[in-house]
Amino acid sequence: MIFQDYVFYALAAILLFAGLRVITARNPVHAALFLVLAFFTAAGIWLLLEAEFLAIALVLVYVGAVMVLFLFVVMMLDINLDRLREGFWNALPVALPVGLLMAAEMVMILGSKHFSADMLNAPAPRPVGYSNTAEIGRQLYTDYLLPFELASVVLLVAIVAAIALTLRERKDSKFIDPAEQVKVKRADRLRIISMPAEKESVSAAEPAAENK
Amino acid sequence: MIAQAQNLLGPLWPVVWTLLKIVAIVVPLMGAVAYLTLAERKVIGFMQVRLGPNRVGYGWLQPVADGLKLLMKEIIIPTAANRTLFLLGPVLAIAPAFAAWAVIPFDLTLVLADIDAGLLYILAMTSVGVYGVIIAGWASNSKYAFLGSLRSAAQIVSYEIAMGFALVGVLMSANSLNLGKIVLAQSGGFWQWYWLPLFPLFIVYFISAVAETNRAPFDVAEGESEIVAGFHVEYSGMAFAVFFLAEYANMILVAMLAALMFLGGWLSPVPFLPDGIFWLLFKVAALLFLFLWFRATFPRYRYDQIMRLGWKVFIPVTLVWILFVGGMMQTRWAYLFH
């Protein structure tokens, strides 16, 4: 075994453990954190395949952004763990056949002679000057330009739809638009009036003198 | 001597050599962090017409005294806290802050890992740093800590987008993600550096960097007047010090990135002076001074104003400037933007 093999097995073991803990951890926050660990380890395995752009993009997008928002939601929800576990025996009759079916499919695919590990040769190591990033860019913007642009338009529509569904102005909220606040000039709030200086009033001084 | 050590260690030599290089980066970095804290207190002191620390070794040993004090203190773990995650929080805050330094070039050859996707790697590492804050806030099981961590996470995720777009402009101009190549693409003196053609991106990047490191005036994550000290309110002793180290290491990192990408890195501003690492260190020090100056000058932003600035001002500005740069590259003025 060469050094890369040891790294692969170490990463694979961590990945399997993390994946297992995602579905077995009792606390949803722990499960989400194990999912983060799984993503991170998967990125390590991609690095072994010399796919450094994809590996770093996986960390950047999934670990750095998606899972942060995910954790955000999971942490703020007040999840009742007992209620979640109540449904276990009711769901089992459906879940068990589905799970078994999926396992059988996996075995059929991975066990067949077309997909077994010795059918897939390890990719030949690239020459030193090869840039994975530039290669992906070239593919995306030449061969796959139309699908790439279509995918981005679909994502844009999804963003617009999500915002349109949730953005409602509540009449009773005391929300203040910061843009309007920033625009405020002195003249909108303050009026400076020019007036003559007043003399000290005589009537106000008199009662004070009487009290003596 | 290096050849002798190479013979002695045999196959272990690359590991030992890399570890030595890591030590050679991390130890000066820790020193820089320690003295940045002193510089901050001194600079803010002078701006407020007072002396700042001047007792322990005439002020020069103050960081050492602070470090010793924090080392001696007890680390209190709240009873209701999640013990494992509570201790994991500071580690996750500082590990990415140091890991990002692996690809920083200090000179043409003085770099630990000269990888092609260096800029992406740094973006990925800094985005992982937010987990330290989130986990610390949640594991403390305290309202103030939790609110602070939510604020901080939302702020960091928002400003990362503007920061990423600012960097897109840089990599368009330099035609590379490799930090060393980005610096070399700026060679030719002060007017060739990217601060000029990418001026809006430079400004957006630097302000986003201040927000990204949770520094004043964007430090609502630890706003003392509202939520005590934010996500690290339950931490004490060395666990607190590690958060502190991570914050300052991140400050130095973003200043270093600004110097490399917009201010020509180790290149000299004028042709008759030689290039060298001292230029880089000088630029970083000047940018760090701005951080301290901001803290002494500006009052804290309100949270919704921070979000508005990030989403409604910075992201549109960067998008427009990226389009503009891309368009100009198709004209005969393209040489101005390379």
Image (cartoon, rainbow, N blue to C red):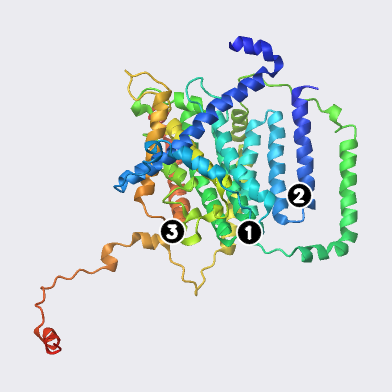
Q: In the rendered image of this protein, does residue A98 appear above or below residue B10?
A: below
* Residue type marked 1: Asn
Q: Alpha-carbon distance for marks 1 and 3?
A: 25 Å
Q: Alpha-carbon distance for marks 2 and 3?
A: 37 Å
- For label 2, the crowd category at 10 Å Cα-Cα, with few meaning under 14, some 14 to 19 and many 20 or more, is many
* Figure disc tally: 3
Question: Which residue is tagged 1?
Answer: B141
* Residue type marked 3: Arg
Question: Which residue is tagged 3?
Answer: B302
Say whether marks 1 and 3 touch (CB < 8 Å).
no
Query: In the picture provided, is B158 more to the left or to the right than A193?
Result: right
Give SS at disc 3.
loop
Q: Position of residue A6 (x, y in %)?
A: 77, 28
The chain carrying label 1 is: B
Q: Alpha-carbon distance for marks 2 and 1?
A: 22 Å
Give SS at disc 2.
helix
Question: Which residue is tagged 2?
Answer: A22
Give SS at disc 1.
loop
Q: Quadrant of the N terminus of chain A?
A: top right
- For label 3, the crowd category at 10 Å Cα-Cα, with few meaning under 14, some 14 to 19 and many 20 or more, is few
> For the residues tagged 2 and 3, is the chain the same?
no
Say whether marks 2 and 1 touch (CB < 8 Å).
no
> For the residues tagged 1 and 3, is the chain the same?
yes
Q: Of the residues tagged 1 and 3, which is closer to the observer?
A: 1
Which picture quadrant has residue B60?
top left
* Residue type marked 2: Val
Query: In the picture provided, is A146 more to the left or to the right than A23?
Result: left
**Picture residue at 34% right of the left edge, 25% below the top:** B269
Observer-nearest of A61 and B109: B109
